[in-house]
Image (spheres, rainbow, N blue to C red):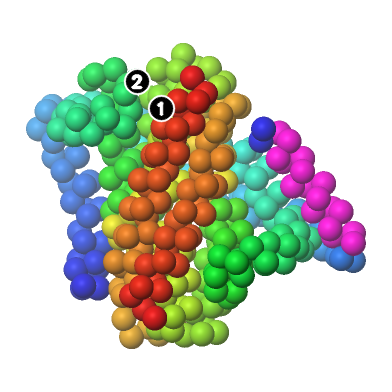
Amino acid sequence: MPELVSIISAWSIPLIIFIILFYGFFKKVNIYETFTEGAREGISTTLSIFPYLLAMIIAIKLIQVSGLIDLLVNLFKPISKILNIPQEVFPLMFLRPLSGSGSLSYTAFLLQEYGPDSFIGKLASTIQGSTETTFYVLAVYFGAVGIKKYRYSLLVGLLTDIVGFMAAIFICRLLFL
Amino acid sequence: MINILWFLFIVFSFLVAALNGRMEQISPAIFQAITDTVNLFLALIGPMAFWLGIMNIAKKSKLTDLIASLLRPIIKLIFPDIPENDPASGAIVMNITANILGLGNAATPLGIKAMQELQRLNNNSTKASFAMCTLLAINTAGLTLIPATIISLRAASGSEDPGIILFTTIFATLFSTITALIFDKFFRLISS
């Protein structure tokens, strides 16, 4: 199975690029000019999301260093006991939607502490692999097109994170315990 | 909403830092965050330019329209308000494909491209359209078939079987994506 994954990983990007270039050339699109035009647009889009990234990363860094995140984790600990969530992975529930690099380094810490092939290691890996950095996605996607009113997007994103988290715990308990 | 949230995040962080006696860590953290943002920006700008360049070819050659037309029934079901034959469908398909294949640095540029197409249909309003909310519901659910980052982290940590979490991850993302779509439909109904 891992071999298949690495084969797919190795082939998918080159194949996608090849197909797009080949099809464009075949359809008589000026692929060189079209590429550079799109790339220029990519640069201006990245510039336009910078302020949103900055605002969000500052807030998330402050939550982490101030100890606010630890406070939240401790505050919700009784709930995690009721829901029977393993204590070791519980902080991931708060870190994951906020910070991709923060939750990845916490997962790396768990893999080192308990071993990647332990139950906690497999569970943390599943959680990390199966959820997204909701705040980052919202800030970048909406920021890029100038949306100020998010409607219910944040709520849906966070509810989904909880569902994904619980689904990961459920399936890991079923298969790995 | 994000306005209030940002304010609360920062004010509570200051308060908690003061109570924890961590005030001296606050300004280094702010400057660290600035550096982190610049680094993220630098990491993002190359893939953004590259993938939007490639995507521009796919769009001009009408390849995205072709792919979108093959998947029309699914798109129509999930995004009922996108007009038929609109380039937005093609961009959405490319974004979801990149997510599923675990092409992390391609998924974001393609997602932004899809958002730009949806913003055109939204008449450049500052309020999110329903289709945008659905696209974000799918993106925040993290649907994937190949969780490449975590598999390489497991391999680097000396795992005997880095790919063993493949099935559990696919199960969890599939489950959360389906619930995300249900939540999205529900909130769309009660807010329209």
Residue B72 lies, in percent from the top left, at 20, 29
Query: As drawn, which residue projects farthest toward the left?
Result: A26
The question of residue B135 being in magenta is answered with no
Q: Main secondary structure of the magenta part?
A: helix
How far across and down, in percent of the image, does residue A20 sit? 19, 39
Residue beneath the point at 24% across and 19% down: B84
Residue A107 relative to residue A119: left or right = right
Residue B10 on the magenta segment: yes
Q: Residue at image x 73%, y 56%?
A: A63
**Residue B131 marker:** 1
Could you say which is closer to the camera, residue A127 or residue A167? Answer: A167
Specify whether B45 is left or right of B67: right
Tell me the residue at 31%/67% (across/down): B166
Chain of the residue that carries numbered disc 2 in the rendered image:
B
* Picture quadrant of residue B64: top left
- Location of the N terminus of chain A (image quadrant): bottom left
Is the residue marked by circle 1 packed among few (<14), some (14-19), or many (20+) residues within 10 Å? many
Name the spot of residue B170 as percent of width and height, x first.
Answer: 32, 60
Above or below A67: residue A155: above
Quadrant hosting residue B89: top left
- Amino acid type at image mark 1: Ala
The residue at which mark 2 appears reads as B81
Residue A78, given in percent of the width and then of the height, sits at: 68, 66
Pointer 1 chain? B
- Quarter occupied by residue A73: bottom right
Span colored in magenta: B3-19
B79 relative to A5 in the view: left or right: right
Q: Amino acid at mark 2?
A: Asp
Do callouts 2 and 1 mark residues in contact (Cβ within 8 Å)?
Answer: yes
